[in-house]
Amino acid sequence: MTYSGDFDAAWLPSGAFRAVGSRRSLIRAADAGPLVETVYGELADACARFGGRVVRGGGEDAELVLELTDDDLGDEGFALTRRDGTTTVTASGGRGLLYGLFHVVRLGEDAFAGERAREEHRPAYASRMLDHWDNVAVHPVMGQVERGYAGGSLFWADGRARGDLGRVRAYGRLLAACGINAVAVNNVNVHATEARLLTDRIGEVAAIADVLRPYGIRTHLSVTFAAPMVLGGLPTADPLDEAVRGWWAEATRRVYEQIGDFGGYVVKADSEGQPGPFAYGRSHADGANTLAAALEPYGGTVHWRAFVYDHHQDWRDRSTDRARAAYDHFTPLDGEFAANAVLQVKHGPMDFQVREPVSPLLGAMPDTRLAVELQVTQEYTGQQRHACWLGPMWSEALRFRPDGEVSAGRLADGLVAVSNAGDDPFWTGHPLAQANLYAFGRLAWDPAADPRAVLGEWIALTHPGAEERLADGLHAVLDGSWSTYEKYTAPLGVGFMVQPGHHYGPSVDGYEYSPWGTYHFADRDGIGVDRTTATGTGYAGQYAKPWAEVYESPETCPDELLLFFHHVPYGHVLHSGKTVIQHIYDTHFEGVEEAEEARRVWAGLADLVEPARHARVAERFEEQLRSAREWRDQVNSYFLRKSGVPDERGRTIH
Amino acid sequence: MTYSGDFDAAWLPSGAFRAVGSRRSLIRAADAGPLVETVYGELADACARFGGRVVRGGGEDAELVLELTDDDLGDEGFALTRRDGTTTVTASGGRGLLYGLFHVVRLGEDAFAGERAREEHRPAYASRMLDHWDNVAVHPVMGQVERGYAGGSLFWADGRARGDLGRVRAYGRLLAACGINAVAVNNVNVHATEARLLTDRIGEVAAIADVLRPYGIRTHLSVTFAAPMVLGGLPTADPLDEAVRGWWAEATRRVYEQIGDFGGYVVKADSEGQPGPFAYGRSHADGANTLAAALEPYGGTVHWRAFVYDHHQDWRDRSTDRARAAYDHFTPLDGEFAANAVLQVKHGPMDFQVREPVSPLLGAMPDTRLAVELQVTQEYTGQQRHACWLGPMWSEALRFRPDGEVSAGRLADGLVAVSNAGDDPFWTGHPLAQANLYAFGRLAWDPAADPRAVLGEWIALTHPGAEERLADGLHAVLDGSWSTYEKYTAPLGVGFMVQPGHHYGPSVDGYEYSPWGTYHFADRDGIGVDRTTATGTGYAGQYAKPWAEVYESPETCPDELLLFFHHVPYGHVLHSGKTVIQHIYDTHFEGVEEAEEARRVWAGLADLVEPARHARVAERFEEQLRSAREWRDQVNSYFLRKSGVPDERGRTIH
């Protein structure tokens, strides 16, 4: 099963299977299901290429044994041991076996060397979900994929599910190889056509679910809260109305007739124009629980987004703070959500900016199931025209502990991300953005993993057998790329200095006088948002200690979040010893220099990378550099014109 | 022939015909053509409603005589006399007779009172053309009508010419009644579908031409300069290539086979991405002349737009000035254009801002036929959501004399405007925007007309028999509305403080760091563009004396254009005695107060206006007021934050 020609093999090129494909393997599974068939198929394909052999059941001598046992490793865990020349993967279920196989693939020859004491691997987050903001019908403003930078949708084209789902199958395989186990197949902004996927067009979803199932992936669906009205013709969508509850129950029953392992619903309610329970004077718990009740008999889950805020805010009103909104809306509801309702919380309080604090809602709802939502699609981080490796950003967020203690475990119960993949030949537009998709899966499995090591895994899998110079080059280009992007864009956590609408490229005042709650308040004297409890919006007080105190004072607030929490004069001195204005100038010059350096390093790798892939990345670096210079010059000019403070190094500012 | 029900009667309601329809009329025309039939039809319809009678040829006693004579009144002129109880209109051609009839309609009972010495009426501009920026196929960004604020296209729907052209016929009648004699039926940005109107889809244009012809209107077509390649499959569109010239000749021959009185082509070349002669190292005269040569045998004209500038300008480069572009591109070509080529020049050097100086190109090409292009569609003047009566603005521009002398005559040879009409029931979205369309036609006939009188005409025709209170109210609402709009938007001629893309609503820096050549250079000390010869871009020097001197110095430059020509400190004192910064604050507060007053006046007219019409305008005033406040607050906040200068009256600035 190769997927060459039409699209890139990403982190599963043929060569990644050399170590397992050149050996004798044995699969022992009494009760084989589709996942075991997938494991068998993967091994059989690899052996066909590399001369190994795979048998099922029998007692033959094998170098690799994959076995279903009664060990209590959970649904998805696996154990790995190596003794007497045999590497053994055991699991309690088919998913665990598949994840174990991909683990062995990742290890490569290392999996077959020496002895290896039993290691147990279990995912930190049971739910590791990708949300696709894909529209079935091309939306007049947002197109086929909202915030998509990788071509069309993998699932939908010409107003319906793709007839040929081969590419979806390949996608499922890639996702399984990095541990993702759930996919929501349509946009959380549910338009008219997409609403019908829940009812008369559920067959199209079922066809997709059939293709993803063999890779251990459950299919979820974004639905509109108004479905009982829009689809059911009811006069209300009031979640406490009996007819409404009945409608959801019946609609859900029909979904499960078609998709027995359907994952559940994703809902964006009372958010940016989507309908929700507020219209009926009901709470979001009321709303979520009605859907949860419909899903409960079948084991489904409702993912209910906490991204609720006033997007018609008056910019003149400095007392309202969008950053507060999710906490203010949802903490009073803690304990009221059903057991199969998951509150899906963006990792920051705003909207996927290059730098935000971790949302105070995480940690503030102990009696509610929470999922953290990340954005793999690079809406605010260069839109896959800029190289921006997000592993370090996510790692930092996922390691955040609301109580300030460095504790093991996880920040929430599930991890969700908006996918960056589309029908682009390289999947992600920018070939290096594949690393972000891979990293999301791997960090969802193990949020404590070192992002540099995860990047190393991705590099090795994607370029099997390549010289070390390639890995060094890719690390040089990617390791610091988030920091580079941060340097040449909005400074010190202030965010949102982007062109309105499409969000690509700089516009310092683009969201300054807007209804979106996104302000920097720069004037001729200073900049930043006072979110302190003492004199500002009080947002800092939504955190527990120590964070509430750390963020409250500009003396203790980390530099990189200073303007998120404080309005300060341009002459304010950072912990770095620089003034705010000089920091702005310096980082913007540095960011461009770093982008230039990345382009140079990439150019030097031409002999090591497949030409089409190299050319695509090289072309993106040109655009990144053009754009970075634009950012540098607009931001620096804006602040020079406003502050009147010259660059102390006398560089050109226009 | 009434057009009630589906759409508004605009300035031709039934009642406007009472005076002519209640009388005995006589038409004398030896050689009756379609125009005479139109005149007869209009009178017959009016008589059927109001009890009069119309006969042809015979020597009966009549109160109104319309007669074709051999007098030399030109193609379109007419003479009016009244003696012994008979009002007589004579003309040399059918168009003149039709214009004479509508003149009598405008006069109403006054046309039938007392005696009237012979008056001769001839249009100042022989060409009075409307350009429709209508797309045949809905454009993904610009929609059906580019910069259209009045619904869909009158001509095109569902990707082709409308089957029912009844509405187009009614439109032609309205245009004839205000003197317009040419219409270009598609967008100057010619996309793929629209390109084909020139060849295999010319039949659709012919159908429209057939409907407009009886109203004296010739049909023109926007074509792409690349047509020989796009449609003809030639390897080049080089205007000096023989095959290209042959292609244009043959294509044009076929057009005239279908439309014998076809008006000609409109071309936007080398402008905002449209193809043009620069690609072949040819001049715009070469380009225009090739099309002119193809049209010449049939009496057609090419309208060649002078809107050529670099839309990929680097905002860092202060030496390049978009305002200079048309003059710099075209004055070296004076005398090189064919006799049937018309250079179509926007009235200002930029792009239809609320305040611009008159383009220096007008007056600088004595050996070239020029047309002035106005924009009736309110792209930058409130998009037909704001009441903005443009008569005074156009009157001011059309009265401008490049040599500073107040001379009779006209600024150029033709007048063109971008239409504001669409398939909206009120034709123009905002019912009061009908007055702009009407005024364009009337000022094209007589640019010396008092705009207040033109507005009076429109009010009287549109509301026959209404109380004087209505006319007073409409004057109160409209007379000063351009000034009001100017007050609450971009100050002192600086322009372009709009939201990028759609151009509605404020964004002070929206076009500041853009590639479009549109900057205000505001910093903490001052604002404006230095376009002087002494220290700036030299644009002021493109004018002849006295203007070059008037504009060169801030001492003599008119206040309203100060920031167009000069960069001055916020404390610079205007001729009005106010500082620039205080002027900004004051006008923005005043503009909103004036919009509030207009809304109040309109509300008081509810008993005098048809309810649906009143409601539509009232709803627009709500939006205008909301938007005006937004303009006020954003502009004032921006400049307070930047300048640090408080409002001397202490009003609220956010």
Image (cartoon, coloured by chain):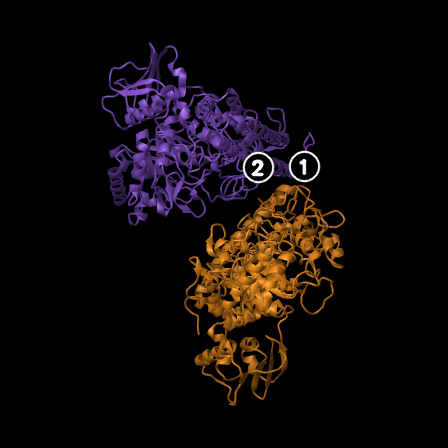
Chain colours: A purple, B orange
The answer to whether A145 appears left or right of A576 in the picture is left
Rendering coords of residue B106 (x, y %): 55, 75
Label 1 vs label 2: CA separation?
A: 25 Å
Residue in front for this viewpoint, B202 or B1: B202
Residue in front for this viewpoint, B549 or B206: B206
The answer to whether A185 appears left or right of B639 in the picture is left
Rendering coords of residue B459 (x, y %): 54, 69
Q: Amino acid at mark 2?
A: Ser
Relative to A465, residue B629 above or below:
below
Mark 1 or mark 2: name the one nearer the start of the chain.
2
Q: Do marks 1 and 2 share a chain?
A: yes
Label 2: how many Cα within 10 Å (few below 14, some 14–19, many 20+): many
Relative to B464, residue A602 above or below:
above
Residue marked by disc 2: A627
Say which element carries label 2. helix
Residue furthest to the left in view is: A30
Rendering coords of residue A629 (x, y %): 60, 35
Disc sitting over residue A644 in the figure: 1
Quarter occupied by residue A20: top left
Relative to B80, residue A249 above or below:
above
Q: Amino acid at mark 1?
A: Gly
